[in-house]
Amino acid sequence: MAGLRGKALVAYLLVCTVWGSTYLAIRIGVMHLPPMLFAGLRFVIAGLLLAGIVLATGDRLPRRLRDWKVLAITGLFLLLGGNAVVVWAEQHVESGAASVFVAAVPLWAAFFDALWPGGTTVFTWRVAVGLALGFLGSGLLAGVTPGELMRADLAGPVALTLASASWALGTVYSKRNPTDTSPYAASAVQMMAGGVVITLLGLVLGEAGEWRWSLPGLGSMAYLIVFGSIIGFTAYAYALRHASATVVGTYAYVNPVVAVLLGWLILREAVTARTIAAMVLILGAVLMIQFAPGAHGPAGPRPERRGAPPRQRKAGV
């Protein structure tokens, strides 16, 4: 793809497929475990494990207080404002309607990236058309009509809108505030920061008394820790360092397609003509955005680590 090549393209495809496969695990998990503690402990454990891997492989965690602050703020935008709010909102909105709101992440990302000075997104007509088609395709895939969205409990749509905006804003914030860390160390800090706050929120809400040990709940958490968090989140951070927030944000369009295909392959769920049309529309929209001239903008230099020779400089966030 025009804006993603090599390892960055592999990372983007991992985000699309891995996060598309986590819907079932999350659904099983919240059936057995309280949502905030489930989400918070998942990220705390994943962050600690990833931090251990980072140190064991000779990498390092951030050394500057400024980097810890930036990564913590990013983690709160992404995981508390984005992930945890979606978990809460699904108590009020069905999953189909929720997926339409979550698919607005690329729209918000393009808006913030174009509005915030120094962005890498050039908002051309092709990008705008691609974003609109992707959103319409997500609605078609979910089978949700505008009337159903309007009739939904107001608390859910408002929360999901804020969650999509929060995730996109966290993505753009991280692009504007590069840190002197690897994507893996950055992901570890973000997950630990966001996870701790979500866990504390769950305790404040009294979820500790609702915790019940069960094999399905722990199995879903284990899957989300390894694949959804350690693999998926670090792949997202890596891809984000090599492309604009708009381009990487299109994963939100692809995730429902992956979920539908997995449901068809594993659970033998029906795939209708409407489903196929929606997937074609979504994937076409993603390609339109990826190949839009100027959609990716200049990458810009990334801050170097101390002692790194000039030839090791890479395009950064």
Image (tube, rainbow, N blue to C red):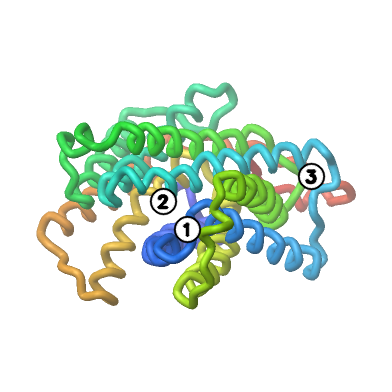
Identify whether 117 is placed above or below 66.
above
Identify whether 317 is placed above or below 268.
above
* Residue 130 percent across, percent down from the top left: 30, 39
Q: Which residue is mark 2?
A: 251
Of the two numbered discs 3 and 1 on the same chain, state the one appearing first in sequence: 1
Residue 74 relative to residue 212: left or right? right
Q: Which residue is mark 3?
A: 304
Q: Nearer the viewer, mark 3 or mark 1?
A: 1
Amino acid type at mark 2: Tyr
* Residue 85 percent across, percent down from the top left: 47, 42
Residue 279 relative to residue 107: left or right? left
Q: Nearer the viewer, residue 83 or 135?
A: 83
Q: Which residue is mark 1?
A: 15
Residue 148 relative to residue 225: left or right? left
Is residue 308 in view? yes
Q: Are marks 2 and 1 in contact (CB under 8 Å)?
A: yes
